Amino acid sequence: MSGLQISVSQEQGRVPVTVLRIEGDVIDANSYQKLEAQARAAMEAGARDLLLDLTKMKYISSAGLRAIHTIFLLLRGDTPGESDETMKKGLMDGSFKSPHLKLLNPSPAVTETLRAMGFDMFLEVHRNLKDAIASF
């Protein structure tokens, strides 16, 4: 099994934010299910806004990207601002960012992978915890 460790904490901004601190070198085929399961557990406990702290991640594989995308889809709301049509238009014009899932401090290598796969088009990336919490 993977050496991936995930700790969960709560931060209070304008809304409560659940922070998943991911520790381990990689999110890959051996560990992505642990991330998805932890996010599902947080949502089942009432979390509606998640911040993935990627500070200690060195690499993310396609399986890790799928896990982040799955979490994004699970957190999508049913408000007009998050409808499929609004999201597609916002992705095309660069105005859509997920209001419920954000990323904290990915390494340069992880940032490049996120950018290459287009995740930076719909996920905000923050460099410090205070700003990230305030953005929700």
Image: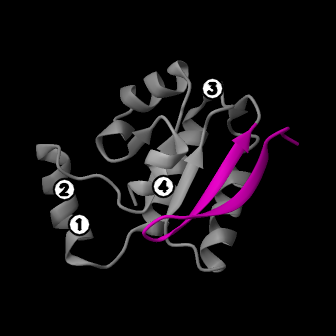
Disc 4 target residue: 133
Q: Is mark 3 on a helix, strand or loop?
A: strand
Above or below for 31 versus 17: above
- Image height of 58 relative to 20, above or below: above
As measured in the structure, the alpha-carbon distance from the residue carrying label 1 to the one carrying label 3 is 30 Å
Where is mark 2, residue-wise?
Answer: 88
Q: Which of marks 2 and 3 is nearer the N terminus?
A: 3
> Of helix, strand and loop, which mostly describes the magenta segment?
strand
Q: Which of marks 2 and 4 is nearer the N terminus?
A: 2
Q: Are marks 2 and 3 in contact (CB under 8 Å)?
A: no
Residue type marked 2: Lys
Residue under numbered circle 1: 84
Q: State the SS at label 1.
A: helix
Residue at left offset 51%, top offset 57%: 70
Q: Residues within 10 Å of mark 3 (few under 14, many from 20)?
A: some
Label 2 packing within 10 angstroms: few (<14), some (14-19), many (20+): some
Give how far across and how far down residue 56 sits, in percent: 69, 31
